Amino acid sequence: MKKKCFIIMTFWTIFVVVLGAYWYLQHLHHDSTMLLPSNSAKGASSISESAASVFFNSLKKYCNLPTSDSVFGFEGDFEESYDLLGVIIIFRHGDRGPLTTVNEKKKINCSSYITKSYKKLEKIVRTYRSETLAAKLLPRSDFCIPGVLSKQGASQLIELGNGFKELYAKHCNFSDSNIIKHLSANTTSYSRTIQSAYSFLFGLVGSKFLNVNLQKSGDVTFCSKYCQCEAANRFEKLHKVELNDLFKTDVSLANFSTQVQRILKNSEKPKKSILPTTLKDILLHYACHDEIPGCSVDESLCVNSTTIIPLDYYLHREATASSSGLNLKKAGILRAYGLLNTIDQQILSWINVSKKRKTKTIMHFPYFHIFSGHDLTLMYILASLGIYDGYLPQYASRLTFEVLSKRSQYYLRVLWNGFDVTQNICPSSQTYCNARFLATFIRFEMKRYFLTDDFLRACNL
Ligand SMILES: *[C@@H]1O[C@H](CO)[C@@H](O)[C@H](O)[C@H]1NC(C)=O
Ligand SMILES: *[C@@H]1O[C@H](CO)[C@@H](O)[C@H](O)[C@H]1NC(C)=O
Ligand SMILES: *[C@@H]1O[C@H](CO)[C@@H](O)[C@H](O)[C@H]1NC(C)=O
Ligand SMILES: *[C@@H]1O[C@H](CO)[C@@H](O)[C@H](O)[C@H]1NC(C)=O
Ligand SMILES: *[C@@H]1O[C@H](CO)[C@@H](O)[C@H](O)[C@H]1NC(C)=O
Ligand SMILES: *[C@@H]1O[C@H](CO)[C@@H](O)[C@H](O)[C@H]1NC(C)=O
């Protein structure tokens, strides 16, 4: 017994040592090759340079960099006794130029992580010979442009679409041209969401993607009839005030503002209050594209060993406050009200059609409906469902609703970025939610927080 144990221990020790050495070498390798930016500030001391690169590398976890490996997720992975009736996917657009610019003169190449599938799409689009169509479908520049999808961002959505094709391969043949009839899409009217939608559809159905009906909506929340809402504006403002107060009053957060000012040295932005999430958005512009801003006089950002801040800690504190914030939850319910109703109606109409279908025909395809939106689109709906962790969703994040059927009963399964969160949303159900759960849920939450299930009355309280 002892001997066996000793042998196991020895093997374990060797394993750990080998693993450690491997990790160490990997780290060194990373540090010396991938991480050093192509145009790192010349003359800066190597110590501060490596501290900055370690810092920027630590931010890469927020980039969701595109890879050609299959997308991780449990979509399509439900109990075999159920049939798939339809899928609704709400995703955030891919990598883009920053919304908050800081007097940036230097352009950053945002095409370092484009995938093979992206090149394929580019090639197909080139055969259309129409400049206007090409400009509508794909990013034009290798460089980041404020608010515009990058080629890296298009790659993320193509890979996501491709991933869904694989995840649902058991339930649906996306090579069959009949799938187009069961595929529909809404997008907000920004070029980054339109191009993200096309990219996703290309990943899903290949060159048939242009045949899909893509409908534009005016609002980032897909609110349809339920857009104007004074109370939602008010609750959202209160939430921001709450966060700003937290960063002013909590001792461990009190230095954040001065630290931000040292990083954003020339910009007008630091004068206004800025939250960790905004700073993250600015820094991701560099981190996701293997760039590190130097600290020279003409640069507007300075991240070196003296200015590095514990951003992860600040983000964590902001996230904790946001995920439990009652004001954000209330704003979320009102902002997501229209979309949740739309989704419920979509589910209802699929169920109606399914009930009318007398026999199982051979041509039996599940429906797919996509919403190409923003981090806020997802934030509101996650907050309303009580599953928002407080971190703004990464590029190409996705919320998936699967409508399932079993012996003429209908069910709803919900996944957030590939993980089944059904039990978090309707904990009292056996395995999946009732298919019409969302309708019941919205009414219940409206009554609970606004003492009325009438949208207009809740908005004018
Ligand atoms: C941007 O980077 C990619 C990948 O490193 C490279 O192929 C491309 O030529 C670069 N574009 C420009 C305009 O420098
Ligand atoms: C999927 O559809 C295509 C085109 O109709 C067909 O060639 C292929 O055999 C089908 N694949 C499966 C697994 O049924
Ligand atoms: C989504 O698009 C469909 C057509 O595909 C349209 O009828 C519907 O109004 C749109 N929904 C929203 C919420 O924009
Ligand atoms: C905040 O800054 C002050 C003055 O620069 C410093 O003494 C203090 O230790 C800092 N607090 C934290 C929590 O970093
Ligand atoms: C970091 O940059 C600032 C501003 O340019 C400079 O004052 C400071 O000395 C730098 N620190 C290091 C360790 O290089
Ligand atoms: C579904 O069917 C029910 C009952 O037949 C009907 O009241 C409802 O309007 C239909 N809804 C949709 C979205 O088709």
Image (cartoon, helix red, strand yellow):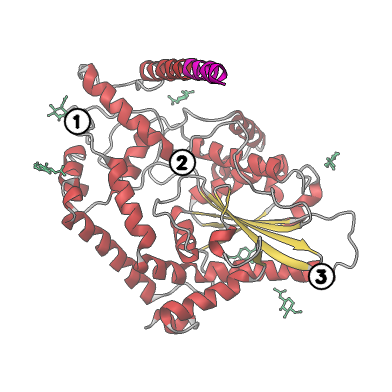
Q: In this view, does 127 lie to the left or right of 389?
A: right
User: Mark 2, mark 3: which one is toward the viewer?
Assistant: 3
Q: Quick check: is 340 in the magenta stretch? A: no
For marks 1 and 3, the one nearer the N-term is: 1
Residue hosting label 3: 355
Label 3 C-beta lies within 8 Å of the nearest ligand 6 atom: no
Residue at the image position 53 percent from the left and 60 percent from the top: 424
- Disc 2/disc 3 C-alpha distance (Å): 41 Å
Q: Where is residue 408 in the image (x, y as percent from the top left)?
A: 80, 68
Quarter of the rendering occupied by the C terminus = bottom left
Secondary structure category for the residue under label 1: loop
What type is the residue that disc 1 sits on? Asp
Q: Residue 412 appears at what percent x and percent y?
A: 66, 62
Which residue lies under the disc numbered 1?
298
Numbered-mark total:
3
Instruction: Write down the region rendered in magenta.
Output: 1-15
Residue 133 vertical placement versus 415 (above, below): above
**Residue 11 counted in the magenta span:** yes
List the residue tagged with mark 2. Answer: 95
The residue that appears at 55% across and 46% down in the rendered structure is: 196
Give the quadrant of residue 264: top left
Element type at mark 3: helix
Q: Is mark 2 on a helix, strand or loop?
A: loop
Depth order, front residue of 4/400: 4
Other-residue count near label 3 (Cα within 10 Å), few / some / many at <14 / 14–19 / ≥20: few
Q: Position of residue 233 (x, y in %)?
A: 35, 70
Quick check: which quadrant has ligand 2?
top right
